């Protein structure tokens, strides 16, 4: 059935484009694996947002994925607790992976979706989550997340350890940006790679509270 005779065809086509991007991002040819991972990310993040933030995030999704986003959603019971262990447990269970594999998978999905959303929109939504959850969504190792959550629940510039961590984040952001802006041997600059590097660097800074969300 062509797009002209099927009113749902454009929505299905766009959903398939997003799913293909996710599959490429997590390096799989299995669309079912990609779908399960995407659905897990959407639901796990959704459950930790308030109603307004969830609506803001869903507005960026294609029609078909927006329906998946709201599947099983109970607005009277959100947001759920923001602790890192429950976040990882829910995401890993829904995605069908171990908790160790969940962290890098979450980071990859965040990067992929950031490239599909309008510039800065995903950062704006995720900035409303606690620091420890933003770490996970950047693909940070859970041991580092738990240590940061136990010692520094939120940024505290009066603590030397927090300052050192922020300096490390700033170094990582600059390194990421520099690598993305390097000219290859053929002398042709990759604009997409540069833009992706800039967004990645900004998310690193955003996770540490070193910059604010775009409006």
Image (tube, rainbow, N blue to C red):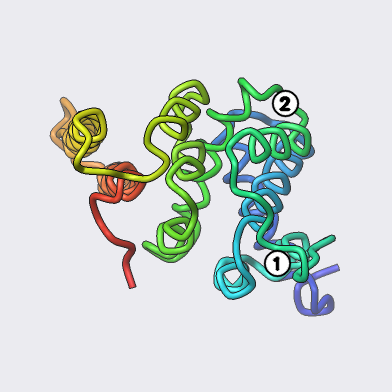
In the depicted view, which residue is nearer to us: 107 or 30?
A: 107
Q: Residue at x 77, y 33 (%)?
A: 93
Vertical placement of residue 179 versus 40, above or below: above
Label 1 with label 2: CB-CB less than 8 Å? no
The image shows residue 170 at horizontal and vertical percentages of 20, 37
Q: Is residue 13 above or below residue 18?
A: below
Residue 127 percent coordinates (x, y): 42, 57
Q: Nearer the viewer, mark 1 or mark 2?
A: 2
Question: In the displayed structure, would residue 76 be above or below residue 176?
Answer: below
Residue 180: tell me if it is visible: no
- 3D distance between C-alphas at marks 1 and 2: 24 Å
| Mark 1 lies on residue | 66
The quadrant of the image that shows the C terminus is bottom left
Give the percent coordinates (x, y) of residue 61.
61, 65
Residue at the image position 58 percent from the left and 75 percent from the top = 52
Residue 132, visible in the rendered structure: yes
Q: Which residue is mark 2?
A: 97
Horizontal and vertical percent position of residue 59 = 59, 73
């Amino acid at each position: 059935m062509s797009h002209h005779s099927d009113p749902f065809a454009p929505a299905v086509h766009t959903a398939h484009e997003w799913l293909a991007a996710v599959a490429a991002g997590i390096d799989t040819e299995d669309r079912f694996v990609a779908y399960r991972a995407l659905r897990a990310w959407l639901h796990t993040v959704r459950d930790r947002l308030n109603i307004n933030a969830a609506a803001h995030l869903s507005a960026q999704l294609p029609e078909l994925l927006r329906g998946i986003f709201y599947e099983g959603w109970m607005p009277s019971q959100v947001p759920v607790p923001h602790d890192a262990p429950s976040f990882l447990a829910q995401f890993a269970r829904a995605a069908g992976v171990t908790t160790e594999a969940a962290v890098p998978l979450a980071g990859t999905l965040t990067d992929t979706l950031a490239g599909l959303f309008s510039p800065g929109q995903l950062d704006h939504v995720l900035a409303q989550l606690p620091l420890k959850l933003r770490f996970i969504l950047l693909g940070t190792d859970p041991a580092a997340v738990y240590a940061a959550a136990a010692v520094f629940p939120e940024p505290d510039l009066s603590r030397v350890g927090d300052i050192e961590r922020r300096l490390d984040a700033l170094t990582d952001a600059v390194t990421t940006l520099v690598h993305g802006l390097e000219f290859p041997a053929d002398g042709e600059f990759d604009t997409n790679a540069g833009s992706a590097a800039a967004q990645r660097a900004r998310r690193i800074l955003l996770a540490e509270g070193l910059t604010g969300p775009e409006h």
